[in-house]
Amino acid sequence: MLQELLGAIAAAGAVGLVYLASGVRIVKQYERGVVFRLGRLRGQVRTPGLALIVPAVDRLQKVNMQIVTMPVPAQEGITRDNVTVRVDAVVYFRVVDAAAATVNVEDYRFAVSQMAQTSLRSIIGKSDLDDLLSNREKLNQGLELMIDSPAIGWGVQIDRVEIKDVSLPDTMKRSMARQAEADRERRARIINADAELQASKKLAEAAQQMADTPAALQLRLLQTVMAVAAEKNSTLVLPIPVELLRFLENAQHPVGDSGVPHDYRSGHAPELPDRSGGDHDGHPPGVR
């Protein structure tokens, strides 16, 4: 009889231990435990560590509190300036209220994904192509606000939203390439014209300085000769003043004080060659 009683006590103890062991749960550091007792939310959220629940009565649901990186599928849309683009993004979010994320929404991950896709298409329609390509920080902030507004009621906080890539049609890429090339050519021409203007001003100042100081021109000529002679070549540069060339040209055509050649100044017209082929008396050739 005593043995049977001891066996019953041991069996009851074993059953009790098994029952208690079935109610033991381990909550990890990055998790929070939400307890439902008979379908109703019970108490506060269980913190990391050992959590005890009533078996067959309570149900513990663990919620991950880590930051989730969710890629948003590429969305195709038309920008405000009528350009068809495909834009994909990535959303960083985390759960801040485990009970709300479990009770208020069926699947908070799917809800955030759908809201991100809808908001991304809305942003594409409200933005210009230049904003999508160069002003992404502002668009990221607007997209974050659009997703974060409904996510607050789900116990989810949006940390950051980033637009990853903007895909353009090939025709638009070629047009943008031509536009960029034309813009760079325009800037190159403006820079060259500005350089020519500055150079002309400096040359004019140098010419004026040399006109005021004639010796400066001679020094410049000597410097040019030295620069040419420094090279190992067989070229000899001999600078000839312009005044010497003018003197030689005037010496070939002497002109008097009145600016008229000496033959005209003496009153006699210069003798012209006989173009008729006859003599001075006016007779044709061979006739006297």
Image (cartoon, rainbow, N blue to C red):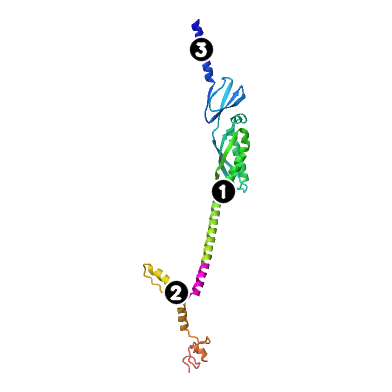
Q: Is residue 120 visible?
A: no
Q: Which segment is the magenta one?
A: 201-214
Q: CA distance from mark 2 to mark 1?
A: 58 Å
In-front residue for pair 153/210: 210
| Dot 2 amino acid type | Gln
Secondary structure of the residue carrying numbered label 1: helix
- At 52% from the left and 90% from the top, the residue drawn is 265
Q: Which mark is residue 218?
A: 2
Report x, y in % for residue 62.
Answer: 55, 28
**Residue 8 placement, left or right of 239:** right
In-front residue for pair 174/207: 207
- At 58% from the left and 49% from the top, the residue drawn is 130
Q: Which mark is residue 253?
A: none
In-front residue for pair 102/236: 102
Q: Earlier in the sequence, mark 3 or mark 2?
A: 3
Q: CA distance from mark 3 to mark 2?
A: 125 Å
Report x, y in % for residue 15.
Answer: 52, 15
Residue receiving disc 1: 134
| Dot 3 amino acid type | Ala
Q: Is residue 280 above or below residue 221?
A: below
Crowd rating for badge 2 (residues with CA inside 10 Å; few <14, some 14–19, many 20+): some
Taking the magenta stretch, the answer to whether it contains residue 109 is no
Q: Main secondary structure of the magenta part?
A: helix
Secondary structure of the residue carrying numbered label 2: helix
Q: Is residue 38 above or below residue 281?
A: above
Residue reaching furthest to the bottom: 288
Dot 3 and dot 2 residues touching (CB under 8 Å): no
**What is the number of callouts on the image?**
3
Residue receiving disc 3: 11
Q: Earlier in the sequence, mark 2 or mark 1?
A: 1
In-front residue for pair 197/272: 197
